[in-house]
Amino acid sequence: NRQIRLARRPKGMPDESCFEMTEEAIPRLREKEVLVRTLYLSVDPYMRGRMNEGKSYVPPFPLGEVIVGGVVGEVVDSRHPDFAKGDLVVGQLGWQDYSVAPGKHLTKIDPDLAPITTALGILGMPGLTAYFGMVDIGKPKSGETVVVSGAAGAVGSAAGQIAKLHGCRVVGIAGSEEKIRYITEELGFDAAINYKTVPDIRKALSQACPKGVDIYFDNVGGDITDAVLTKINYQARIVLCGQIALYNLEKPDVGPRNFTRLLINSAMMKGFIVSDYADRFPEGMKRLTEWVSQGKLKYRETIIEGLENTPRAFLGLFRGENIGKQLVKVADP
Ligand code: NDP
């Protein structure tokens, strides 16, 4: 059983030396446990926080242990009454070929409903994050202007489309021309800004948002957020979903800046963690599944093959190598 472990804690931007691949025999199943063969695994920006020593909202990955993350897999052996060989499941398992987990930590997925990879993306944690962040905190109303940063990623691409479904004008900010084309031409965003090439992001925002910004769904923080805050309207809602631009800083950034804009506009900024909404996941899943099956909510996945390439896939998130949800394919179903 090949496994990827945390070899050292990074300072600043992590690299491949933070990870090591080891091999170990598969443990024997105990009562109520299930053996799962990994098919796809998810790499997510929040995992960067878990590589640090200090506690965030999730405890740090222990040094030397297998990295834990979202996995879609196939049951190959079971000592739990609810699971049988061949079942497809999703759960927080490990960066490894096989995982042993208590059955109560696994959820069955129906491959006839949607491709199984979606359980890690649009019909999983990132989709739910977009849904609750936009609907519950953003509270989009028809005709409002919405800006989404990290707009071509797993969460951002869904958040922008959900705002479109509520009748909003949606402007995305992303880091490549391919991403700009994707969100405007395929996802129906009304305008998009390439933050890496635009000479003046404030001017570009003014042009793209002639009526100002009513909702800002923030995945990145930093300079982009500083700029968007200068454009917010009276009673704007700022959904603080992620701050990826800050995750690899060795020293905390100066700021946040432009908070006077919140004050003079009676605006609100609210952070959240998707698990805050755990009791409403069924509602979110129902809406997301309906929209996906009706073709109203599109999604893309960037898939790298091979367990050994998982660190590279993870590090690619911080270089913007993914469009939509970044996954690793570990084995064929
Ligand atoms: P993405 O699919 O959006 O992948 C990350 C993207 O972030 C990259 O593709 C890149 O796109 C962009 N990025 C990377 N570095 C920077 C930078 N320095 N400045 C600006 N953009 C950058 O990831 P997710 O959709 O999974 O997550 C998006 C955000 O949401 C993250 O901040 C994550 O932590 C947060 N999140 C929060 C949750 C919650 O419960 N609150 C749950 C899930 C995610 P580009 O080419 O455009 O730069």
Image (cartoon, rainbow, N blue to C red):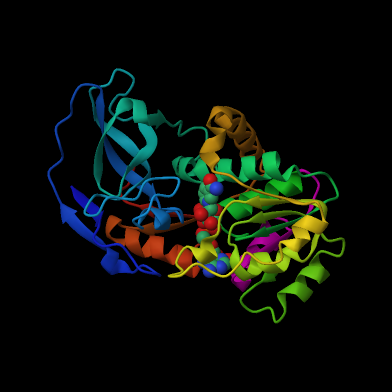
Give the residue displayed 38% in from the left and 33% down from the top.
89
Q: Relative to the observer, which residue lies in front, 305 or 153?
A: 153
- Image quadrant in which the C terminus is located: top left
* Location of residue 216 by image quarter: bottom right
Q: Is residue 332 visible?
A: yes
Query: Height in image: 27 above or below 1?
Result: above
In this view, which residue lies farthest toward the top?
Answer: 81
Q: Relative to the observer, which residue lies in front, 329 or 275?
A: 275
Query: Height in image: 293 above or below 191?
Result: above
Give the residue displayed 60% in from the left and 34% down from the top.
284
Q: Indicate yes or no whether the magenta region holds residue 302.
A: no
Q: How many marks?
A: 0
Q: Relative to the observer, which residue lies in front, 151 or 294?
A: 151
In this view, which residue lies farthest toward the bottom?
Answer: 199
Task: Locate residue 327, reporting x and y percent.
Answer: 42, 53
Q: Indicate yes or no whether the magenta region holds residue 187.
A: yes
Task: Locate residue 108, reporting x and y percent.
Answer: 41, 29
Left or right of residue 226: residue 204: right
* Location of residue 43 by image quarter: bottom left
Give the residue displayed 77% in from the left and 61% down from the top.
261
Query: Height in image: 15 above or below 200?
Result: above
Tell me the magenta residue range: 166-191
Task: Locate residue 152, reporting x and y percent.
Answer: 60, 60
